[in-house]
Image (cartoon, rainbow, N blue to C red):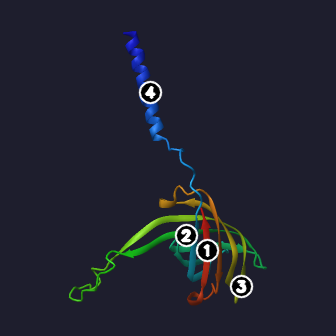
Amino acid sequence: MKHVKICARRCALLVAAAALMLAMPSNSGAQQSPATYNINLALADEHVDDHGRTVITMMASGDLRGVLTLAISSVPDGTVTDGEWSLNVSYTVPLNPDAQPDFSLPDPDAAIGEQLIQRGVLSGTVTGGSITQADGQVAWLIGLRLSLTNGTVEFADVPNGFGTADGSNVNDRTNSAGSMTLTF
């Protein structure tokens, strides 16, 4: 009987160990290489927040679509001293891309419809770069260095990364343009 009890304990320990092994993430595969994402920026808006930082939002398209927000501090010569950024990767797609408006319905576009895609938010700090100003507003973003420190939803497991951002005519919504790269 003693032998049966020892065997039962060993079996229970083996089952528990196997369950723990299955619950742990596997490290058997090679770590995935970082990828670089290219993003186009446009339609800038700008204001100064309660902390005196310049806050710039721009629409993002390309590899990661959504809205970029930068909050930066700079010294009079245009050197960016610090800041933070976030890219909300969120956009809409048509539910039925081939649908045509039906003008016999109260809402002719009802058959078309859209679906919101929320992939998540990437964010971090601005660690350097520079700006130029015109008429008291930021006109150019030059070589902003971005450190990626956080991700949510689809990007929750993203390791730290880095990137850059540049922008022109940021003080002119219609003619603003820019680019951004993120590597993670």
Kind of residue at badge 3: Gln
- Residue positioned 63% across, 86% down in the render: 171
Instruction: Write the residue at 68% across / 73% down.
Output: 144
Residue denoted by label 3: 133
Decide: few, some or many residues near mark 3? Use Cα within 10 Å; few <14, some 14-19, many ≥20. Answer: some
Q: Secondary structure at mark 2?
A: strand
- Disc number at residue 14? 4
The residue that mark 1 highlights is 180
Mark 4 is surrounded, within 10 Å at the Cα level, by few (under 14), some (14 to 19) or many (20 or more) other residues, namely: few
Marks 3 and 1 in Cβ contact (< 8 Å): no
Quadrant of residue 168 within the rendered picture: bottom right
Pick the front one: 57 or 29: 29
Q: Secondary structure at mark 1?
A: strand
Residue at x 50%, y 73% (from the top left corner): 65
Q: Amino acid at mark 4?
A: Leu
Residue 148: give x, y in percent of width and height: 62, 62
Image coordinates of residue 109 in percent, x first then y, are: 29, 83
In this figure, which residue is indicated by the disc labeled 2? 87
Q: Residues within 10 Å of mark 2 (few under 14, many from 20)?
A: many
Question: As drawn, which residue projects farthest toward the right?
Answer: 77
Disc 3 to disc 2, C-alpha distance? 24 Å
Left or right, 104 with respect to 143, comes to left
- Circle 1 packing at 10 Å, graded few (<14), some (14-19), many (20+), is many
Q: Earlier in the sequence, mark 2 or mark 4?
A: 4
The three-letter code of the residue at mark 1 reads: Met
